[in-house]
Each structure stands twice: as structure tokens, then as C-alpha cells.
Amino acid sequence: MKFKKVDKIDEKLSVIGFGCWGISGPEYWDGTTDENSIKAIHKAIEYGVNFFDVAPVYGFGHAEEILGKAVKGFRNKIIIATKCGLIWDEEKRIMNNLKPESIFKEVENSLRRLQTDYIDLYQLHWPDPNTDIGETMDAMLELKRSGKIRYIGLSNFSVSEAKRAMQKAEISSMQGLYNMLERNANSYHSIPLEYRTERDILPFCLENGMAFFPYSPLLQGLLTGKFTGNESFKDVRAANPNLSGEKFKMYINVVKKLNDIADKIKKPLSQIALNWLIRNEAVTSVIAGAQNSQQLEENIGAVTWEMDDALYYEIERIVADSDVI
Ligand SMILES: NC(=O)c1ccc[n+]([C@@H]2O[C@H](COP(=O)([O-])OP(=O)(O)OC[C@H]3O[C@@H](n4cnc5c(N)ncnc54)[C@H](OP(=O)(O)O)[C@@H]3O)[C@@H](O)[C@H]2O)c1
């Protein structure tokens, strides 16, 4: 494994992390079984992955429970990054809530599900327009003082929102949508994004010594080269408008060209997509999802080679010519 270090986090983080949305259970992500999820997590730890990104809302508590079960006995070897700010009601309708009383409740539930007494990195999942960020940060500071959380991170926040949060407390990381084909996206699953990742967030993280975690690094499986364009997703990907219709066709066309490169250099496209991110100095740990040990092993194989400039510029030319970004 290779590791990266940023000023605002003491530990070195593995360049490949483990994104836990995919272990939410078969109801939310096709092809998952808890047994395979746990095996994949154990395999990841064996290969030196030390960064695990999860959230309460992934499978409505299920992903945190599975992660907690899987990392028992390995707790001191890994960094657990979970989130707060997306809560749900009895009908599983999801709402933003970053009010202190809600965060205090959420943290206890996460600690219980994760079977731990501390969270390494506690991230605000999405901004909450109905709560003053100062109030939220006071709550986060209280959690830090009590030892329940070690670092504070932001996810899906713009630079101006982050600056407001930083007036109250140290922010150690940011997380946002970023992959070879979604660099400055203005929406995610039809939710408007108030930030532009490559243009604004990456330089901001570098300037401030914060970690950056790119989510959907494989564009939910597209950048493994396995989709044909005829897929009709029944899982969470059904909510991604870019994985159906015209945009999906455009993506498939560019992926065909990227697959040709993969064939030429005899590397899986997934590793090319991950190495494209790893070579970026602002990217700390790439939180790729994996449903099973095979996917995990293929993805971790990215660390066995590096993307040289020639390959990088070839990809940049194909993507620029494709009109998808
Ligand atoms: N902060 C946020 O708002 C936010 C939003 C989204 C995600 N995230 C985080 O980012 C993580 C990753 O994002 P993501 O889950 O959206 O997508 P992703 O990492 O781009 O794609 C993961 C999916 O691709 C497929 N896959 C992975 N490796 C593969 C391989 N080698 N060969 C074939 N298929 C492979 C698997 O699904 P199939 O096998 O079913 O195709 C897997 O679940 C999440 O788990 C979560 O931790 C955060």
C-alpha cells in the first residue's frame, strides 16, 4: 500500500480507501451480501487499507453495523470516517439536519453501530440551510472535547461554506464528487452542487493542509469499463440521471476509447481511473466502493504501478474531445 500525509491529520492515509455505501445491503446496492462485504473489508485491511468512509444513511444504519462488525479486533489499525446531517423518518424519508441536538443523537447511534467509543473523522454530510453553521460547529467542538470524535470534516460543502465553518473550528478534510469524467459537476443524483471540485475544492484543500476524499471515483462502476449502455439499474444508481439516457450513451462512447487504452497497456480501466486520482497531489485517499474481494483486489492493484505523463495526457485528450465534461 502507498500512503499520503496531510498537515491536518496525524496518521498517514492509504491512497486507496474503502467506500462503504456499497455494503448497505442488497436492498440498496445490487449484488451485495453481508458476508462478501465483511470478506472485502478484511481483505482491504490485509492489503494495508486504513481509511474507511461510511455514513449512517447508507442502508439506514446497515453499512455502519457491517463495518463495526468487520473491524472488531482491528480498530487501532484503521481510521473510521463517518458522517452526520442526513437523518430519516419511519418511512425512510431522508432530511438534512445539522442542529446540535440531532448531531448529539446521531453520534451515539453511530458509536453503537460501529461498536467503538470514538470516531476518527466526523464529517458533515451535506450543508443544512436551516441551521446556522456556527451552532453546528459548537456541537462538533463539544464532541471533540469529549473525545467522541477526533477530527472534523466536511462533505459537499463549498469553499465559502467551509470558510464559515473554519472560523469556529479546525477542519481536517473535505469530500466531494470527483472522477475522470466528473471534475466540476454541478449536480449529483439531481441534487445541485454548490461547489466545483477541481476548480475550487482541490486548491483549497492543498492550501490549507486538509485531506480531500473524492467520492464515486469509479463513477459508480462506469469507469471499470463493464457497462454496455443497456443497463437499467434497480439499485441506488437508478437515481443517477447520468447512468441512463443521452448522457449515459456519451459516457459509454468515451469509456470505449478508455477501454482501448486499458487493453493496450494491459491494465484494468478501474486501475487507470484510480491512478488518475492518486497522481493528483490534492487527492488523499480514494474512497472506492467494492462489493466483494475480487473487486477490492483489482482496485488495490492500482498501487502496483503509476500513471506516467504520456498516459495521463492521452486520457486528457480523449476526455477533452468527448465533450462529457
Ligand atoms: N459524501 C457523499 O455525499 C458521498 C456520495 C457518494 C459516495 N460517497 C462515498 O464514496 C464511496 C464510493 O462512491 P460510490 O459507491 O458512489 O461509487 P464508486 O466507488 O465510483 O463505484 C463503486 C461500485 O463500482 C463497482 N465496482 C467497484 N470496483 C469494481 C471493479 N474492480 N470491477 C467491477 N466493478 C467494480 C461496484 O458496484 P457493482 O459491482 O454493483 O457494479 C461498486 O460498488 C461510497 O461508498 C461512499 O463512501 C460519498
Image (tube, helix red, strand yellow):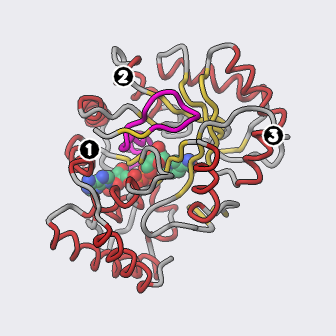
Quadrant housing residue 192: bottom right
Q: How many labels does the image show?
A: 3
Asked whether the residues under the numbered discs 2 and 3 touch, taking CB atoms below 8 Å apart as contact, a structural biologist would say no
Q: Does the residue labelled 2 lie within 8 Å of ligand 1?
A: no
Q: Specify whether residue 274 is in view.
A: yes
Q: Is mark 1 within 8 Å of ligand 1?
A: yes
Front position in the image: 279 or 114: 279
Residue at which label 1 appears: 296
- At 16% from the left and 71% from the top, the residue drawn is 263
> Of the residues shown, which amino acid type is indicated by label 1?
Leu
User: Predominant secondary structure in magenta?
Assistant: loop
> Of the residues shown, which amino acid type is indicated by label 2?
Val
Q: In this view, does 100 lie to the left or right of 94?
A: right
Q: Specify whether residue 28 is in view.
A: no
In this picture, which residue range is highlighted in magenta? 5-29
Q: Distance between the residues labelled 1 and 3?
A: 37 Å
Q: Is 280 part of what is drawn in magenta?
A: no
- At 34% from the left and 64% from the top, the residue drawn is 223
Give the crowd class for mark 3: few <14, some 14-19, many >=20 residues within 10 Å: many
Going from the N terminus, do you reach mark 1 or mark 3 first? Answer: 3
Above or below residue 165? Residue 129 is below
Disc sitting over residue 71 in the figure: 2
Horizontal and vertical percent position of residue 210: 59, 42
